[in-house]
Image (spheres, rainbow, N blue to C red):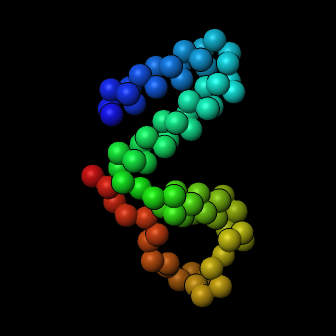
């Protein structure tokens, strides 16, 4: 699986260098899917990460009503080694 991942990353780089942005983006999605499977991450984990990133960019969006301002939330993601 790691060899497949390396090959996909090379393909993405070649497509991007050739100016095929849409195709490179599609290969990026395949790379993300494979990385998630290799690291045993669920779609819920990915959604939680995206929500946290959006909230970091705009703190007023996606605010959890149960969490008071200044209060730390419990981590939504787990550490994968």
Is 45 placed left or right of 67 in the picture?
left
Q: Is residue 6 visible?
A: yes
Is 20 placed left or right of 70 in the picture?
right
Quadrant where the N terminus is found in the figure = top left
Numbered-mark total: 0
Residue 29 picture location, percent across and down: 56, 38
Residue 45 picture location, percent across and down: 48, 61
Query: Looking at the image, which residue sits at the far top?
Result: 18
Residue 33 picture location, percent across and down: 49, 43
The front one of 32 and 51 is 32
What residue is at 56 percent from the left and 30 percent from the top? 27
What residue is at 44 percent from the left and 71 percent from the top? 75
Residue 17 picture location, percent across and down: 60, 14
The front one of 77 and 27 is 27
Query: Looking at the image, which residue sits at the far left?
Result: 81
What residue is at 35 percent from the left and 50 percent from the top? 39
Determine whether 81 is above or below 65 in the image: above
Residue 24: which quarter of the image?
top right
Residue 28: which quarter of the image?
top right
Residue 26: which quarter of the image?
top right
Q: Is residue 49 visible?
A: no
Is 67 placed left or right of 42 in the picture?
right
Determine whether 5 is above or below 47 in the image: above
């Amino acid at each position: 699986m790691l060899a497949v991942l390396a090959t996909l990353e090379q393909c993405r780089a070649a497509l991007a260098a050739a100016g095929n942005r849409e195709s490179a983006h599609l290969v990026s999605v395949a790379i993300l899917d494979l990385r998630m499977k290799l690291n045993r991450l669920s779609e819920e984990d990915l959604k939680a990460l995206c929500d946290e990133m959006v909230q970091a960019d705009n703190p007023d969006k996606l605010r959890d009503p149960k969490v008071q301002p200044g209060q730390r939330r419990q981590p939504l993601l787990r550490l994968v080694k």
